[in-house]
Image (cartoon, rainbow, N blue to C red):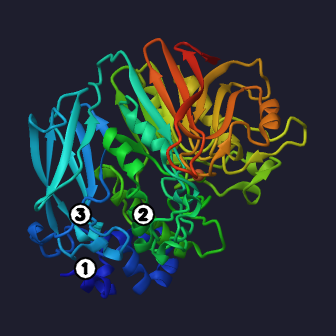
Amino acid sequence: MTPAHRAGSPREADHSPELRAAARHFGRRGFLTVTGAAAALAFSAGLPGTAHAAEADPRRITEDPFTLGVASGDPLPGSVLLWTRLAPRPYEPGSGMPRARVQVRWELAHDARFTRIVRRGQATAHPELDHSVHAEVTGLDADRVYHYRFRAGTWISPAGRTRTAPRPGARPGELRLAAVSCQAYHDGYFTAYRHLADEDLDAVFHLGDYLYEYAVNATGGARAYTDRRLPAHFNRETVTLEDYRLRYGLYKSDPDLMAAHAAHPFVVTWDDHETENNYAGGTPENDVPPEEFLLRRAAAYRAYWENQPLRAPQRPTGPDMRLYRRLRFGRLARFDILDTRQYRSDQAYGDGWQTPGPASEDPSRTMLGTTQERWLLDGWRAADTTWNVVPQQVTFARRRNVPTPAYKLSMDAWDGYPAARARLLDGAAAAGIENLVVLTGDVHVGYAFDLKADFDDPASRTVGTEIVATSVASGKDGADRPANWADITAANPHLKFYNGRRGYVTVTLTGERARADFRTVAAVTTPGAPVTTAASFVTEAGDPGLKPV
Ligand code: FE
Ligand code: CA
């Protein structure tokens, strides 16, 4: 059966797992309001195995299909996940591909010139998954660099470099990471990624806002293109599956972003803008019926999976996607990668910066949802690594806006979910977790926090650190000291660093210490700015607390 038939046939679509998931979500009553055309469009474009598109001869691809580069992700001791997407014309609906399956070959080599190829394989690019390729390569050496590329017909992709994780019991001497977030295309160039590509790293953690749903005008917003015009369909907010797919085509075609993906494996998690600003679980930002929002969420999640180097367990079912997961690099570090959007309670007091009160402090409020929270706390009880790193989205430390009793807190951050934060810190203490490092994005500035046993008492025990990576582009050029720098710094004695430039953070972990280097670029509205280190901090293993270097 062709995908077109499925989309037109609600009876057939009724049997799809996507729609059954939707029914579970909406309840029977709400579900009935979204069956038919809208639901069929959102969930039943057909998935491989249920719909069988014809196979196209890859020799008939007459334009370069590798315009979006390559990526790798989620390194395991003997395995990497390789990604690409066939898109000869990524700014057009359908990306210039036929509605047919295409066989893509991949090659893995020890060297960048592919003279010592160690593994070859094939993967299918399905039209139902927008011709994305997710090739899981197993049986590799642990803790080793590999080079990879794809072939479709006569076309060869750019080459990528990746690296497997060390064995679970290994004690690697050093692990070098970077954390990035928030790359609003229309706010500037991805100059930070150009520099990130040149760093010597084992992995990059993307902490969310990989794309923004907002309109991008013909000249690319703050990029102010003079040499090209972007199609008009980018100049509206993304809502449908096609909208989100096209928007990934725009973002992924950025040469600096492609260079960063080609240079390092990425471990990605999302925040809000991959779907919609400040949504909370099933609650949209604006006044939209929940069942309609969940259709949008399903479209956004599906396009996210299609366009990221994620493994099969992360593939969404309707509006559900298991993005939280765990990675480890030997005995040196484990990473509990969180999803703080999909399961959270709605923001208290209508969101924004508010005076905290009973509504935000209600102990029944959740940031992670019951299942993910239990998974994290149970995981910590079994932890056996020197460093316990938590890549996630929104600011974890308490953050007052002014140093007066009339302060407000961000209801979208953990400050709006203080009981949930306390459960995590209590759980970490009960599990004997040492060397807790929270990695955060979202706020478009760099912060370095000591995490306190009692944020009201600066003399209380420091229980960990939080490193907040600034944005790659969101917020345009920024400034070293934003307008609220003095207020924020005075209001939060546990805040050791605050910088409002664009850039990224590198984190180097050894058995003895963690070091964070805040790397910033002076401008993103013009291309080509150099990178500098705004500040560096270390925290010693067994003695949490940031010290300037
Ligand atoms: Fe953002
Ligand atoms: Ca965000």
Give the quarter of the figure containing the C terminus: top right
| Amino acid on which the number 2 mark rests in the picture | Leu
Residue 65's disc number: 3
Residue shown at the point (79%, 23%) measured from the top left: 457
Q: Nearer the viewer, mark 2 or mark 1?
A: 2
How crowded is the residue under tag 3: few (<14 C-alpha within 10 Å), some, or many (20+)? Answer: many
Q: Report the residue marked by disc 1.
A: 3
Q: Secondary structure at mark 1?
A: helix
Does label 1 or label 3 sit earlier along the sequence?
1
x, y percentage for residue 324?
44, 45
Residue shown at the point (21%, 50%) measured from the top left: 135
Q: Is residue 452 visible?
A: yes
x, y percentage for residue 250?
42, 63
Q: Secondary structure at mark 3?
A: loop
Which quadrant holds residue 166?
A: top left
Does label 2 or label 1 sit earlier along the sequence?
1
Residue 250's disc number: 2
| Amino acid on which the number 3 mark rests in the picture | Pro
Does label 3 or label 2 sit earlier along the sequence?
3
Relative to 256, is 154 on the left or the right? left
Inter-mark Cα distance, 3 to 2: 15 Å
Residue shown at the point (58%, 32%) measured from the top left: 467
Inter-mark Cα distance, 1 to 3: 22 Å
How crowded is the residue under tag 1: few (<14 C-alpha within 10 Å), some, or many (20+)? Answer: many
Relative to 526, is 193 on the left or the right? left
x, y percentage for residue 509?
45, 21
Q: Nearer the viewer, mark 1 or mark 3?
A: 3
How crowded is the residue under tag 2: few (<14 C-alpha within 10 Å), some, or many (20+)? Answer: some
